[in-house]
Image (cartoon, rainbow, N blue to C red):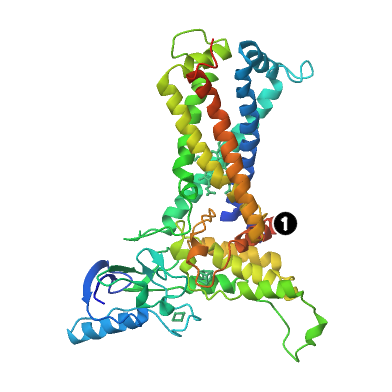
Amino acid sequence: MKNARAARTTIALKLGMAVSGFIFIGFVLAHMYGNLKAFAGHDAFNDYAHHLRQIGEPMLPHEGVLWILRVGLIVSLVVHVYCAVVLWRRASHARGTKYVTKKNTGASRSSLTMRWGGLTILVFLVWHLLNFTIGKINPQGGATNDPYNLLVDTFDVWWLTLIYLVAMVALGLHLNHGVWSAAQTLGWTGNAAKRVRAKRLALALALIVSVGFSLVPLGVLAGIITK
Amino acid sequence: MNLTLKIWRQPDASSAGAMHTYQLADVSEDMSFLEMLDVLNEQLNAEGEEPIAFDSDCREGICGACGLMINGDAHGPEVTTTCQLHMRSFKDGETITIEPWRSEGFPVVKDLIVDRSAFDRIIQQGGYVSVNTGSAPEAHSVPVPKEDADRAFNVATCIGCGACVAACPNGSASLFMGAKITHLGLLPQGQPERDERVVNMVAQHDFEGFGGCTNIGACTAACPKEIPLDVISQLNKDLRTAIRHGH
Ligand code: HEM
Ligand code: SF4
Ligand code: FES
């Protein structure tokens, strides 16, 4: 009984969130790099997408590495969302009676939007996969077997660009608090100087990821990325 | 100064409560917040109404009994305890909202008084070191680096007031636990029970119904002893280490 207790605490749940969160960050940075290939033109982008599916061949089957990564990401997502939901419910219960007046002195905007912001990212993720990966929905009715053209067709529609940009704001906010929070959860911020460094790193990563992803739809909007 | 006070009234733990509004005139700026409530209670007594129940003991910022949620800030607008808060921090004509700590782990006993014995139970799970009684050992036989001694002393100043829980949007007591974990973890005497300490304290914390920490930082902003967020990092690190050691 006693031997298993540490792993059943709220802090263990936070460790699960931190580790899965870092796996997402690794993925998100690699994904962003791939997206930015759109600036190199139709062929460079499509070649990259194609080569991704060939990594490890013929040792591994077609899309082998991609599937290993996908399984890792799906497991991480399940862990991340499961821990988030359990902790969210706990927190609501812990403050069962609300205050009539409550200021959140000392709390950042990002830290207070983790849950609804995370949910926004989740909803976006479902749509995003339908759009580009599983469903390959081309809103212009054009071809869907050409990744580059599908991208341009999508971001030629203003409201799809808007959904995407809103999601990137949500992701930026999530990372601005999440990266620092994960560092703290892992016990890496044991003094004031380390805390400041973790918060700066979090802001930098949040900006790199949200701006980096936003450049592609903005590039389509500005007519830099065209068919 | 003249004030409008909106105060939570609740006859006992099992009855429903509500906010009541009171007018209080001629409050001196030099009064402490609790003295202001004393004056209000004299007025209520004179009117034949039940005085407002609130907790206090030392009234000099060291016992941690006096916590109140004042205008949405734990212990009010200054970084201090409610007993050390003075009316000069408020404006003439101001409306002040006064509520008890709201936490699953701190049930309301009456009006503004909550039961903070959950903190005692967390401390009982590991906020101590076991030593054999008998004659005191030679103090120099266990050297403690000055830096560690200073830091241990700084975090040992936690008075268990519960403002961290009250301020935390998750109702987490991580700052309180982290202060004790860091304090004892820095000292040689704290080492033998280090792993069990963190596991048992956190398990009791969760059992009492406190929430999980999301590193928002509202706790440290409300803490009258300015316990820093570092202690939560230390708490997490100690728990991670305990998991690694198979606890
Ligand atoms: C690409 C997607 C995502 C990334 C990169 C990401 C990253 C992170 C990171 C690094 C943390 C910090 C962990 C910690 O505090 O120890 C975190 C926390 C959190 N995430 Fe995510 N996350 C993502 C998606 C989601 C989704 C879909 C949800 C949906 C519910 C979510 C909800 C949360 C919550 C509630 C927290 C804890 C709040 C806190 O620590 O303040 N996240 N996330
Ligand atoms: S950590 Fe600060 S706010 Fe929390 S109980 Fe101790 S003194 Fe009070
Ligand atoms: S009454 Fe003791 S700290 Fe305020």
Q: Residue at x 63, y 13 (%)?
A: A46
Residue B187 in view here: no
At label 1, the amino acid type is Gly
Q: Nearer the viewer, residue A181 or B90?
A: B90
Classify residue A118 as left or right of residue A148. Answer: left
Ligand 3 lies in quarter: bottom left
Image quadrant in which the N terminus of chain B is located: bottom left
Where does residue A37 sit, x and y in percent of width and height? Answer: 63, 20
Q: Nearer the viewer, residue B29 or A54?
A: B29
In the depicted structure, whether residue B36 falls above or below residue B244: below
Residue corresponding to mark 1: B246
Left or right, A45 with respect to B119, comes to right
Q: Is residue B160 above or below residue B59?
A: above
Q: Where is residue B14 shown, x and y percent of the image?
A: 31, 69
- Residue positioned 47% across, 25% down in the render: A127
Label 1 CA crowd tier, 10 Å (few <14, some 14–19, many 20+): some
Residue A72: percent from left, percent from top: 65, 33
Residue A113 position within the rendered picture, expressed as x and y whole percent measured from the top left? 46, 45
Element type at marker 1? loop
Q: Is residue B185 visible?
A: yes
Please give the chain letter of the residue carrying mark 1.
Answer: B
User: Which quadrant would residue B232 be assigned to in this image?
Assistant: bottom right
Name, please, the residue furthest toward the bottom: B135
Q: Give the image quarter of residue B18.
A: bottom left
